[in-house]
Structures are given as C-alpha cells and as structure tokens.
Amino acid sequence: MDSGVQMGWMFNSPDQQVEIYRQGQQKEARSLPTLLSGEGILLGFEFPVDKFDNN
C-alpha cells in the first residue's frame, strides 16, 4: 500500500479466503465463495470468487 495503491486482493487458496487490503484500513479476510467489488475505486466492477480447487 506504500506505493499509492488504494485497494488490493490477495487470494489465499489453502485457507479458502480472499484478503482485502484498503489504504489506511485493517485487512479484511473473507471466506469463499464471495463477491468482490471495485467499491468506490472501480465503480460497477464485481468479481465472483468460488472456492479454489486444490488438486
């Protein structure tokens, strides 16, 4: 976040979670499946994430 990025997602397949990083806020972890959105940064963007196949 030090580079000026406003939001980032990290996909954690072993834990079946997505970690959401926002500028100036605590990390949020969401269990899968979930729907990610661009919030106020990418208006109207939505990305559905199903559980990962660990095969």
Image (tube, helix red, strand yellow):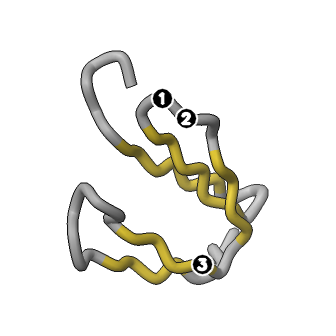
Q: CA distance from mark 2 to mark 3?
A: 20 Å
Q: Are marks 2 and 1 in contact (CB under 8 Å)?
A: yes
Task: Name the residue tied to disc 1.
Answer: 24
Task: Name the residue tied to disc 3.
Answer: 34
Using the rendered image of the protein, determine whether residue 30 is visible from the camera's viewpoint. Answer: yes
Taking the image as shown, residue 8 lies to the left or right of residue 13, namely left
Q: Secondary structure at mark 3?
A: strand
Quarter in which the C terminus is drawn? bottom right
Kind of residue indicated by mark 3: Thr
Q: Label 2: how many residues lie within 10 Å, few (<14), some (14-19) or many (20+)?
A: few
Going 46% across and 83% down the picture, which residue do you hit? 48
Q: Quadrant of residue 1?
A: top left
Q: Quadrant of residue 47?
A: bottom left
Q: Label 1: how many residues lie within 10 Å, few (<14), some (14-19) or many (20+)?
A: few
| Mark 2 or 3: the one toward you | 2
Q: Secondary structure at mark 1?
A: loop
Q: CA distance from mark 2 to mark 1?
A: 4 Å
Identify which residue, 32 or 44, lies in the foreground.
44
Going 65% across and 81% down the picture, which residue do you hit? 33
- Residue extending furthest top? 2
Q: Are marks 2 and 3 in contact (CB under 8 Å)?
A: no
Residue 41: image tag: none
Q: Quadrant of residue 6?
A: top left
Task: Name the residue tied to disc 2.
Answer: 25
Using the rendered image of the protein, determine whether residue 55 is visible from the camera's viewpoint. Answer: no
- Counting from the top left corner in percent of width and height, residue 19 is at 60, 50
- Counting from the top left corner in percent of width and height, residue 25 is at 55, 35
